């Protein structure tokens, strides 16, 4: 009788362990991303919400792979990666987080402009920004990217770092853009030769406050536990969706994109421990 009770206890314990959050601890780690600044009209699409639906974005919101950020005519959104890198999404922009895996971190700018201060990456890390016509691979730099509908993409580097720019289509070729330089990538064409800043010359003054913002965010950053992130995301899911006419009135460029493919069972991310400078 005692042996039977012992067997039942072992089986029940195994089931409990298998159903606990730790059962997903084998999921690959991801960098913790967070909205650290929201100004004006900014809207957020949560990856597990119906495609094309948005909620009003709020400062402090955790950002996950598959989330999409739209900014209105007066909007600005700031995304921090582990408190170490900072991405500033300018007005009338469409920005999607594709991957937060340290080995391959990817973002997509469908429309608009962004400025970024990216920390130096480790040898086994990769970070890139894409647009409909260009791909910019970053190793740690200060850069800007701009993309207008149906027009060339522009990629520029400010005072530090280098960016490898290629065409996202069949244009072939690539170019390395260094400090004080920019390039242009036309649809179905290869990147132009790097030349001194022109398109982004007016944006250069924005980098000084962005550097200070990055330092402030880094100084005050506190990592959240998976449970804290899950709780905040659940509260975001309960927020009402923003109606289409509200987005239009705010000057949001809500492009009709093809829904991303579903990638198996969704798992809550396991934040990666950030490296201190």
Image (tube, helix red, strand yellow):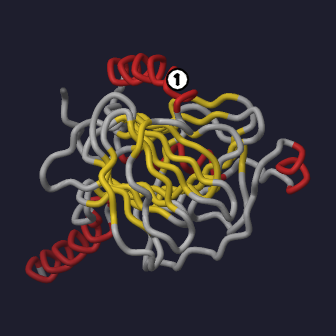
* Residue located at (48% from left, 56% from top): 97
Q: Where residue 67 appears, x then y in whole percent? A: 55, 56
Locate the C terminus and report the quarter of the image it occupies.
top left
Crowd around label 1: few <14 · some 14–19 · many ≥20 (10 Å): few
Quarter that holds the N terminus = bottom left
- At which x and y percent is residue 229? 44, 44
Residue 90 location (% of width, % of height): 62, 37
Q: Where does residue 11 sit, x and y in percent of width and height?
A: 21, 78
Q: Residue pushed farthest left?
A: 3
Vertical relation: 238 (above or below) 79: below
Element assignment for label 1? helix
Q: Residue at x 21, y 44 (%)?
A: 121
Determine whether 220 is above or below 173 in the image. above
Whether residue 25 is visible? yes
Q: Which residue is mark 1?
A: 206
Determine whether 35 is above or below 219 in the image. below
Question: On the rendered structure, is 40 left or right of 165?
Answer: right
Q: Is residue 79 above or below residue 270?
A: above
Near-viewer residue (17 or 165): 165
Horizontal arrangement in the rendering, residue 68 relative to residue 208 (left or right):
right
In this rendering, would 42 be left or right of 206? right
Foreground pick, 213 / 111: 111
């Amino acid at each position: 009788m005692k042996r039977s009770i012992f067997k039942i206890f072992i089986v029940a314990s195994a089931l409990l362990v298998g159903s606990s959050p730790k059962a997903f601890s084998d999921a690959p780690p991801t960098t913790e991303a967070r909205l650290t600044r929201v100004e004006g009209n900014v809207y957020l699409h949560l990856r597990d919400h119906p495609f094309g639906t948005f909620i009003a974005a709020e400062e402090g919101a955790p950002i996950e792979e598959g989330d999409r950020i739209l900014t209105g005519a007066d909007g600005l959104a700031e995304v921090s990666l582990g408190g170490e890198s900072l991405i500033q999404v300018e007005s009338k922009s469409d920005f999607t987080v594709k991957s937060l895996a340290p080995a391959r971190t990817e973002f997509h700018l469908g429309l608009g402009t962004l400025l970024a201060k990216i920390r130096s990456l480790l040898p086994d890390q990769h970070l890139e920004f894409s647009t409909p016509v260009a791909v910019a691979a970053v190793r740690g730099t200060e850069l800007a990217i701009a993309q207008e509908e149906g027009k060339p993409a522009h990629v520029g580097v400010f005072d530090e770092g280098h960016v490898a720019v290629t065409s996202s289509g069949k244009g072939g070729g690539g170019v390395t853009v260094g400090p004080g330089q920019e390039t242009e990538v036309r649809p179905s064409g290869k990147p132009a030769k790097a030349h001194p800043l022109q398109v982004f010359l007016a944006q250069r003054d924005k980098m000084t406050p962005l550097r200070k913002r990055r330092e402030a965010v880094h100084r005050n950053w506190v990592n959240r536990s998976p449970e804290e992130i899950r709780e905040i995301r659940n509260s975001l899911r309960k927020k009402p969706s923003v109606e289409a006419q509200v987005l239009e009135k705010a000057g949001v460029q809500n492009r009709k994109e093809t829904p991303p493919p579903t990638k198996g069972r969704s798992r809550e991310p396991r934040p990666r421990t950030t490296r201190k400078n």
